Amino acid sequence: VDTKDPIFKVSVEAGAKPGQKYVSSSVVRVLLKAEDDNVDPAKLVVTDNGEVIHDVKWFANTASLAIIEDGTHKIELSGTDAVGNTGEPSSVSFVLDTIAPDVTPSLSGSIGNNGVYRGQVTVSFSLGDEPNEDTNNYHWTATRTLPNQQPEEISLTATNFKTYPFTADGTYHITFYAVDLAGNVSETKSVDFAIDATAPQAQIIAPEGTVTNDANVTFNIRKPMWEGLTA
């Protein structure tokens, strides 16, 4: 007489660490075990996200599955032994993601002439519909250049977030990349923009002394630091 319920165990044996939710391996191997003296593979049910996997090859009381398709997976083992004792289902869940994220930058601010911004520019990054975005894993560097000066690297208070405001006048060059939750690293890209928030200085040059006839008056618009930019 066999009244003992089988014990089912499902675990990841290769391609991911125990308990790892997001996986970037090309294949994840899942180990299935049915611990019982009367194991009958025909009465065991293996599913992936609720869909039965029919081609499981059992060797005694163990089987191994190779999961290669990107996406969310829940591998579950359930069923009975040969005499009908029902075991408690066992499962393992993970997200397989082998695709590197594609980062898209966006700039927001008030644009003037020649594409130059009149004030603060907020730079934001997005992975679009990437389901495994890690909002704390954006990495970027920024340099600012003033006319007739060498570029200087800007010390950012946060270099791994997805948005940052820039306020000082200058031409900016931003390089950036992102890492998703599975550890896939995006291509490094760059974006450029310029800020000119400094108002021009008007200078009036009039003839000296008393003028009794028509005279020429000269107006000069001076922007000592930004002669090459018009906002």
Image: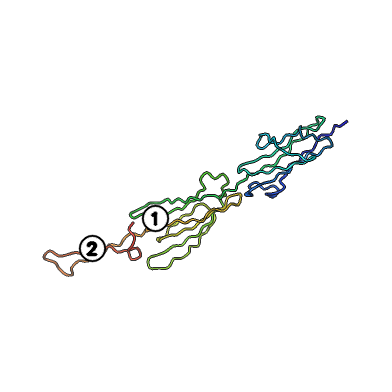
> Residue at coordinates 41% horizontally, 60% vertically from top-left?
171
Q: Secondary structure at mark 2?
A: strand
Instruction: Judge left or right: residue 209 versus residue 163.
Output: left
Horizontally, residue 9 falls left or right of residue 143, namely right
Q: CA distance from mark 2 to mark 1?
A: 26 Å
Q: Say how many tags the image has.
A: 2
Q: Which residue is mark 2?
A: 219
Q: Among all residues in the image, which is located at the extreme left? A: 213
**Residue depicted at 14% across the width and 68% down the height:** 210
Q: Earlier in the sequence, mark 2 or mark 1?
A: 1
Residue furthest bottom as drawn: 209
Q: Residue furthest right?
A: 1
Residue 86 pos. (x, y %): 78, 32
Crowd tier of the residue under label 1, counting other residues whose Cα lies within 10 Å: few below 14, some 14–19, many 20 or above: many
Residue 5: x and y, percent? 81, 34
Q: Quadrant of the C terminus?
A: bottom left
On screen, 35 above or below 151? Answer: above
Mark 1: secondary structure = loop
**161 or 97: nearer the viewer:** 97
Q: Amino acid at mark 2?
A: Phe
Q: Amino acid at mark 1?
A: Gly
**Compared to 56, does 169 lie above or below?**
below
Q: Which residue is depicted at the point 32% across and 58% down?
A: 230
Q: Answer left or right for 213 relative to 14.
A: left
Residue beneath label 1, please? Answer: 119
